[in-house]
């Protein structure tokens, strides 16, 4: 008992002292490291959010521009806005014709209202209750003056809309003047978007420490996740955003340590701005993460310290370590005498050796299960992608009023699902896979109006061989959707054969082809798997590597203007 107490003291005394010292050092060191890392992570995330906001708002602008163009092309628009309305009946008739534009307005990514003004005094809106501004007030707006000067859509912001239903709602509106072929002005279009509808693109990414807003080139806050700031002016923030753009920098750290990131959105002549407050950022996540990191580092250091102390105070452990180092595979049990603790370790070690075989077996089973899970995951990746493209093809046929072809496509889809989704394993015969491919071709060919032809065939001695389920479909799908972007017409050929117990699958098209750099990226880069346009090729490549590790090949031969030739091979089995 005396020996046990002495050993316990030798272990605990230096461990306790060193642990306290390491905790203090860890807190000081990791605090600085984590704060810098947290800031950089927040900055990078905010830059990505601003870039995505730019993309989303640009898409909104494109849709708004399309709507304005559709309105401008309305045959009776110029007469309804430019011809004089001398009587109540003429004005009523003009308003009725204009209301037809509102009833047929297309959907957009955001809510919007249309307000039309004509030189004949007409002012009408798609919003409920009519317009709230006087006719002359519209033409006094700065946005109108700018739009009149350059002829493009110019954006501005107001704290109240143009109609009674939106007069208490902040809006962002685009202004487009209307002129005839001779350049004579006859009216103007205002397209109003509620501020909250634009805010949806970034609001979910804001937090107490990170605010996001849209700042006009005049310093007015058009949209913000902080509603009370909407409509106010911030000249200092505008100056910082302009400076970032001039210096081609992503962000600036202000005197109060606030980090201001900005991204100029050309279509709106405005800045998407993100403000990060470091002190609040640390409060959100700093304490918890810092504690976790400190504990991890401390435990790691404590483990090394325990190993060092045990090595010096418990010599029998060296014998055990040498025995383990000299062993090959699973070591044989060994009995080591010494202190009470050492004998307990020796006994536990022998028990561990006895049960190690069982553990190795379980590990092997876990590895096999993981392999199956990875295959299932890849299969799940194919199905939604394929189903999306198929439904898109059916939608295209319906829009083209090809109901018969749409029905035949759906029948082929049903046949394909019956032959694939009912399979519980990952392997089918080549004959079954050919039927799957033919069904898929029947599904996708009508969409291209016969401009792209596909055929599939196999050598007779291959029909009973095994092949992974839906292995060829992603490659054919990829050829249809991406190989004929420029040529628009061509053919796809699929042929399977075996040679020296190796099954070869060749997929050839005479489409656009790919440059050598893209081909090399598809065969080597791990990042290619995140590309939507390459998911089929990468998926097939990974499935082959899982099913036939080291025994498969995947080759792409392509040249721009001459098409693409894909050759894949793996062991032939029945």
Image: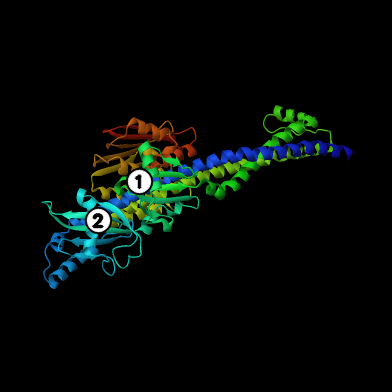
Callout 2: helix, strand or loop? helix
Residue that badge 2 annotates = 67
Which residue occupies the foreground of this view, 183 or 387? 183
In-image side of 289 versus 208 (left or right): right
Give me the residue at 76% from left, 30% from top: 311
Q: Is residue 346 visible?
A: no
Disc nearer the start of the sequence (2/1): 2
In the image, is residue 76 above or below residue 52? Answer: below
Marks counted in the figure total: 2
In the image, is residue 296 above or below residue 203? Answer: above
Q: Indicate the position of residue 483 as horizontal and vertical percent values.
A: 30, 40
Which residue occupies the foreground of this view, 39 or 574? 39
C-alpha distance separating marks 2 and 1: 41 Å
In-image side of 456 versus 552 (left or right): left
In-image side of 274 versus 478 (left or right): right
Q: Is residue 159 visible?
A: yes
In-image side of 396 versus 18 (left or right): left
Residue that badge 1 annotates = 437
Q: Indicate the position of residue 279 as horizontal and vertical percent values.
A: 54, 47
Which residue occupies the foreground of this view, 308 or 555? 308
Give me the residue at 87% from left, 37% from top: 3
């Amino acid at each position: 008992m005396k020996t046990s107490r002495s050993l316990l003291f030798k272990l605990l005394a230096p461990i306790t002292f060193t642990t306290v010292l390491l905790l203090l050092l860890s807190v000081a060191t990791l605090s600085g490291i984590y704060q810098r890392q947290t800031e950089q992570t927040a900055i990078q995330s905010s830059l990505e959010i601003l870039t995505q906001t730019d993309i989303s708002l640009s898409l909104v602008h494109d849709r708004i521009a399309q709507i304005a163009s559709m309105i401008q092309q309305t045959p009776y628009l110029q007469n309804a806005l430019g011809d004089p309305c001398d009587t109540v009946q003429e004005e009523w008739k003009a308003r009725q014709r204009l209301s037809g534009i509102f009833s047929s307005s297309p959907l957009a990514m955001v809510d919007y209202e249309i307000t039309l003004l004509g030189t004949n005094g007409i002012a009408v809106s798609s919003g409920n209750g009519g317009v709230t501004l006087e006719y002359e007030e519209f033409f006094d707006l700065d946005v109108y003056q700018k739009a009149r000067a350059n002829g493009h859509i110019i954006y501005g912001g107001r704290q109240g809309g143009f109609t009674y239903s939106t007069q208490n709602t902040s809006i962002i509106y685009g202004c487009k003047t209307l002129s005839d072929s001779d350049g004579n002005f006859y009216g103007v279009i205002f397209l109003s978007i509620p501020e909250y509808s634009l805010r949806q693109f970034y609001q979910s990414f804001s937090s107490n420490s990170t605010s996001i807003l849209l700042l006009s080139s005049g310093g007015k806050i058009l949209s913000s996740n902080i509603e009370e700031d909407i409509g106010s002016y911030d000249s200092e923030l505008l100056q910082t955003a302009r400076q970032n753009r001039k210096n081609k920098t992503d962000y600036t750290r202000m005197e109060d340590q606030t980090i201001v990131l900005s991204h100029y959105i050309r279509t709106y002549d405005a800045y998407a701005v993100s403000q990060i407050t470091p002190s609040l950022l640390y409060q959100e996540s700093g304490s918890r993460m810092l504690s976790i990191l400190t504990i991890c580092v401390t435990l790691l250091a404590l483990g090394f310290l325990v190993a060092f102390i045990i090595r010096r105070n418990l010599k029998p452990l060296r014998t055990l370590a040498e025995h383990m180092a000299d062993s090959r595979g699973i070591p044989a049990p060994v009995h080591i005498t010494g202190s009470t603790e050492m004998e307990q370790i020796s006994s536990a070690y022998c028990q561990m050796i006895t049960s190690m075989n069982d553990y190795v077996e379980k590990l092997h089973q876990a590895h096999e299960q993981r392999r199956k899970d990875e295959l299932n995951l890849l299969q799940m990746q194919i199905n939604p992608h394929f189903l999306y493209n198929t439904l898109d093809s059916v939608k295209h046929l319906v829009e083209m009023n090809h109901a018969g072809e749409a029905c035949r496509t759906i029948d082929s889809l049903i046949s394909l699902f019956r032959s694939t989704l009912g399979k519980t394993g990952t392997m089918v015969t080549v004959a079954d896979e050919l039927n799957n491919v033919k069904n898929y071709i029947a599904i996708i060919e009508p969409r291209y109006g016969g401009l792209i032809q596909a055929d599939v065939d196999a050598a007779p001695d291959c029909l009973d061989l095994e092949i992974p389920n839906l292995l060829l479909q992603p490659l054919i799908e990829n050829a249809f959707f991406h190989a004929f972007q420029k040529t628009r017409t061509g053919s796809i050929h699929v042929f399977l054969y075996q040679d020296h117990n190796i099954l070869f699958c060749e997929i050839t098209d005479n489409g656009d082809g790919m440059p050598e750099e893209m081909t090399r990226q598809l065969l080597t880069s791990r990042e290619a798997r995140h590309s939507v346009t390459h998911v089929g090729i990468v998926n097939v490549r990974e499935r082959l590597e899982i099913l036939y590790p080291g025994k498969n090949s995947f080759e792409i031969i392509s040249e721009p203007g001459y098409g693409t030739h894909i050759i894949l091979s793996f062991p032939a089995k029945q």
